[in-house]
Amino acid sequence: MDHSNMDHSNMDHSNMDHSNMDHGSMMGAESGSHGDHLGMMMQMSFYFGYTDVVVLFDGWVINDIGSLVGSMVGICIIAALYEGLKVFREHLLRKSMVTVSYHSVAVPGPENLPVVETQKTTGSRILSSAHLIQTLLHVLQIVVSYFLMLVFMTYNVWLCIAVAIGAGIGYFSFGWKRAIVIDINEHCH
């Protein structure tokens, strides 16, 4: 029986007894996907807490100061290595572009005497090991940058500070080696 065209606006269920209804098996948008964290809502403003903080995965939960400090150190290291990865990719790109081949060509010179001229050619190919490595490192860079963004989006101030300090340490450690200071490949961090 099709009830889609029926008007249900006048139905009143306020007099019904709802005390015996079991809503425990119902899966809403806020439950079912967080394992032990059923019904837990995502924080939408910055906070300084250190209990029940889920970081990236259900298995990575901060419940005490020790796990907070350990998570901060780990996140700081990941953010620093992310900065190193960007510099390493640039270094590999410069190194692959330095591969120069020389060709000697005889060209007519003054009085039609052949003159040997050396031409230098550089180039990159789509099917090269250097390009494949750059592609894999680019994918890794994107994944790590989105992970760091998601850590920041926990809105936990301590974790946000860890991302910022790690990025600062990484830039201080590796950034001085960069030939290009402005990174147009920056995605979300």
Image (cartoon, rainbow, N blue to C red):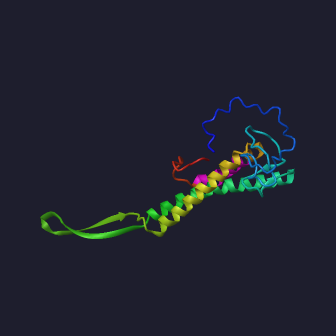
Residue 152, placed above or below residue 6 = below
Residue 164 location (% of width, % of height) = 69, 46
The answer to whether residue 137 is seen in the rendering is yes
Q: Nearer the viewer, residue 115 or 161?
A: 161
Q: Which residue is drawn at 48% across and 60% down?
A: 94
The answer to whether residue 88 is seen in the rendering is no
Q: Residue at x 60, y 36 (%)?
A: 5
Residue 175 location (% of width, % of height) = 60, 52
Give the image quarter of residue 77.
bottom right
Residue 58, placed above or below residue 17 = below
Q: Which of 144 and 167 is in front in this view?
A: 144
Q: Residue at x 38, y 63 (%)?
A: 122
* Residue 103 appears left or right of 77: left
Residue 114 location (% of width, % of height) = 18, 70
Residue 33, placed above or below residue 10 = below
Queried whether the magenta region covers residue 36, the answer comes back as no
Magenta stretch: give its range.
Answer: 162-176
Q: Quadrant of the N terminus?
A: top right
Residue 75, placed above or below residue 18 = below
* Residue 156 appears left or right of 84: right
In the orientation shown, which residue stands out farthest toward the top?
10
Q: Which of 6 and 176 is in front in this view?
A: 6
Q: Main secondary structure of the magenta part?
A: helix
